[in-house]
Amino acid sequence: MKNYFKATSENIPIAVECLRNSNLIAHSTDTLPGLAADATNDKAIDKIIKLKKRPGPYSIVISSLDDIEKYAIVNKKQIDKINKILPGKFTVLLKNNNKNNLSKLCLGGSDLIGFRIPEHQFTNELVSEFKKPIITTSLNVTTHDSITDLKTASIDFKDLVIFDDKIKRVSKGSTILDFSSNELIIIRHGDESYIK
C-alpha cells in the first residue's frame, strides 16, 4: 500500500480505514505533525507507546466542544473560557469523568484528559468522520526532536501511513492549560499565548 498521501478531504476515508484497523497514521496539524491512533483502542495505543518509548498520558482530539462533556467533568464557566480558545493551538486539561470508553493506555494513570480541537481542516474532518476521539501526539521518539517534515518521516517510519498538507510550520507545539481546578495553570507555553 502507498504510504504517503496529501492531507485532503478526498483522502479522509483512507485515514479512517487505517485507524479502524488499529493502525497508526502521521498527519499534519496546526502545530507539529501528529502521530495518531484511535484513543479507545489498546492495540493501537500500544503501538504508539512502543514507537515513542513512553507510556501515556496522551491528549485526544475531539470534533467539537460538545464532546468534552462525554469525557470530562466540566462546568459552564470552564466551557465559556475554553470556547474562546478552541479551535486553536491549545491543549485543555480537565478531570476525567470516568464515564467514557477511552483506553487506560491513553490515560496513562492520570485523572486528567488533554483535549485538542486544532485549527486544521484535515484533522477536524478526520475526527468527525472517524466518530471517535483520536490521540495525536508529536511524531518522535521521546527525548528526540519532533519530526517537522512528513516527507522525511515517510522514509524513517516506513510502516506509517502519512497525510501531509506540505505546509512547513515552525512550532513549539500547543500551549497546555490546566482547567481542572479553580485556578487555571499554564503547564507549557506553546505556539499561542493565553491571556487570563
Image (spheres, rainbow, N blue to C red):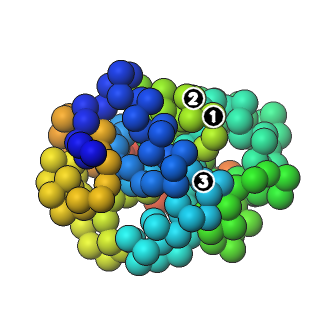
Q: Is residue 65 visible?
A: yes
Q: Which mark is residue 131?
A: 1
**What residue appears at the point 60 percent right and 53 percent down from the top-left corner?**
39
Which image quarter: residue 93? Answer: bottom right
Instruction: Spot the residue most to the top.
Output: 10
Q: Which mark is residue 128?
A: 2
Along the polypeptide, which appears first: circle 1 or circle 3? 3
Residue 131 coordinates in the image, percent (x, y): 63, 34
Residue 118 coordinates in the image, percent (x, y): 46, 36
Q: Tell me how far mark 1 sits from mark 2, CA to CA.
A: 5 Å
Number of on-image labels = 3
4 vs 192, left or right, is left
> What amino acid is found at the position of numbered circle 2 in the picture?
Ser
> What amino acid is found at the position of numbered circle 1 in the picture?
Lys
Along the polypeptide, which appears first: circle 3 or circle 2? 3
51 vs 74, left or right, is left
In the displayed structure, 189 sits above or below 2; it is below
Q: Tell me how far mark 1 sits from mark 3, CA to CA.
A: 11 Å
In the displayed structure, 143 sits above or below 44; it is below
Q: Which mark is residue 185?
A: none
The residue wearing badge 3 is 39
In the depicted view, which residue is nearer to us: 136 or 101? 101
* Element on which disc 1 rests: loop
Residue 32 coordinates in the image, percent (x, y): 32, 49
* Mark 3 nearby-residue class (10 Å; few <14, some 14–19, many ≥20): many
